Amino acid sequence: METKELFKKTLIGQIRALDQFGTWVNKSDEDLLVEKYVKTKEEMRNIPIIADIDEMQTQDIRLVYQAVALAFEKMTGIMCSVVMEMSHEGFGRVVVFADDIVLCDKGFKDAHRYSFRTLENLEEEGEKLLMKANERYKKYKS
Amino acid sequence: METKELFKKTLIGQIRALDQFGTWVNKSDEDLLVEKYVKTKEEMRNIPIIADIDEMQTQDIRLVYQAVALAFEKMTGIMCSVVMEMSHEGFGRVVVFADDIVLCDKGFKDAHRYSFRTLENLEEEGEKLLMKANERYKKYKS
């Protein structure tokens, strides 16, 4: 499977696994991803620069990095871990690592505004993170 | 400076830096460390196996790993980061990393019981973590 496709499928799988009450059963994968991660420029304008982040949003960001970890596992068979800290003000950091190698890490300053302009952007970000993870791991472990 | 001494001094520095109101000014370093990190077997028996962890305790655990990061920086000049997540039930994980290399990571299952039997034990743990961090970094970066 292509990296981009793998990331997308894994992310969708992670989201649907949390759908305890079947609320999203009738939603398509695309609609679900757009609802969670895509915000247009207009929508962004309506989100304050400084605001609190709720647990749901923190979870959604976490899922992206969990999807990177899981997709990396699927590709390589190597187990990954995700550790993320997030203050209620939306300051935080996430790190994905396998053995002793950091596959990716990212800091957040206004996590409540975390979003992509298009679905394509989200998929590209996932692909980029996965390719970089692969590169980093190979650099130290081969 | 010896590794053990360096860890201890760094940890004390971190603790005292948080003493906004000067509450601990008259306490010796040893007393402060014992108060925060040392619990006898008797004291441990009085702490329930399952209980919530408060923010103060989470902070105290974080300080140990921040001290490892900072002491590593002092020794090598290489910048480190600490990312820690902790649920209110005391489940969590901490990771210390420099560049792409994980220097140490630890999972917690009952973090509200985090403690050492003697002050010596705490210092030895710090020394061990630092030596391991050094080893790991050298393994990949030289």
Image (spheres, coloured by chain):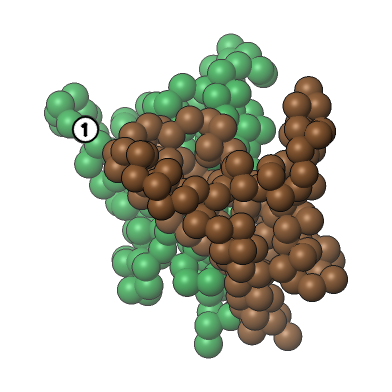
Chain colours: A brown, B green
Residue B24 coordinates in the image, percent (x, y): 21, 28
Q: Residues within 10 Å of mark 1 (few under 14, many from 20)?
A: few
* Residue shown at 53% from the left, 71% from the top: B100
| Number of marks | 1
Please indicate, yes or no, whether residue A109 appears anywhere in the rendered image: yes
Question: Seen in the image, is B23 located left or right of residue A141?
Answer: left
Quadrant of res A3: bottom right
Q: Amino acid at mark 1?
A: Asp
From the viewer's perspective, is residue A18 above or below residue A74? above
* Residue shown at 57% from the left, 48% from the top: A37
* Residue shown at 38% from the left, 72% from the top: B78
Of B26 and B22, which appears nearest the observer? B22
From the viewer's perspective, is residue B131 above or below residue A27? below
Question: Seen in the image, is B15 located left or right of residue B82?
Answer: left
Please indicate, yes or no, whether residue B26 appears anywhere in the rendered image: no
Residue A63 coordinates in the image, percent (x, y): 64, 47
Q: Mark 1 belongs to which subunit?
A: B
* Residue shown at 21% from the left, 33% from the top: B19
Residue for badge 1 = B19
Quadrant of res A107: bottom left
Of B42 and A104, which appears nearest the observer? A104
Residue B34 coordinates in the image, percent (x, y): 39, 31
Secondary structure under tag 1 reads loop
Of A95 and A110, which appears nearest the observer? A110
